[in-house]
Amino acid sequence: MEEHRLGNRIRAFRKLKGYTQQEFAEKMGVSVALLGSVERGMKEPSEMMMKRIGELLGIELSELLAAPKIDHKEGS
């Protein structure tokens, strides 16, 4: 389940930076199939791959790995 959340965050940050999956895979030096597997949570990225993702997206790994904040508003 953790890989799925991480994959969703990788996909979201990739899209925010304007990369298609094909473009990002090429910049990463991996296949689109591998990147897709990571984004779907089917495969866990290596430490080296995580560092490269952070570099390309211009974000710290801690930000990529951070749990999303949930806003609990009363009366919502």
Image (cartoon, helix red, strand yellow):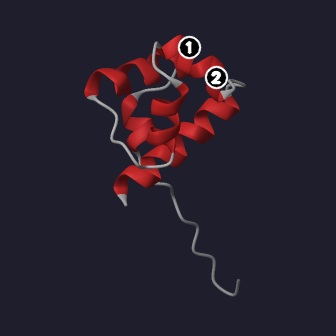
Residue 44 is tagged as: none
**Rendered residue at 28%/29% (across/down):** 46
**Rendered residue at 69%/33% (across/down):** 16
The amino acid marked with disc number 2 is Gln
Q: How many marks?
A: 2
Query: Could you tell me how far apart the alpha carbons at marks 1 and 2 are, in whole angstroms?
Result: 6 Å
| Extreme residue in the left direction | 47
55 versus 15 height, above or below: above
Residue 26 located left or right of residue 64: right
Question: In terms of secondary structure, where does tag 2 sit?
Answer: helix
Read off the residue under disc 2.
22
**Rendered residue at 69%/26% (across/down):** 20
**Mark 1 in CB contact with mark 2 (< 8 angstroms):** yes
Answer with the quarter of the image where residue 23 lies: top right
27 versus 57 height, above or below: above
Residue 74 located left or right of residue 49: right
Quadrant including the C terminus: bottom right
Which percent across, then down, holds residue 5? 45, 53
Which percent across, then down, holds residue 12? 61, 41
35 versus 43 height, above or below: above
Answer few, some or many: residues within 10 Å of disc 2's Cα (few below 14, many 20 plus, some between 14 and 19): some
Read off the residue under disc 1.
26
Quadrant including the N terminus: bottom left
Which percent across, then down, holds residue 69? 51, 58
Which percent across, then down, holds residue 9? 52, 44
Question: In terms of secondary structure, where does tag 1 sit?
Answer: helix
Answer few, some or many: residues within 10 Å of disc 1's Cα (few below 14, many 20 plus, some between 14 and 19): few
Answer with the quarter of the image where residue 25 lies: top right
| Extreme residue in the bottom direction | 75
The amino acid marked with disc number 1 is Glu
Residue 29 located left or right of residue 62: right
Q: Is 24 in front, or is 68?
A: 24
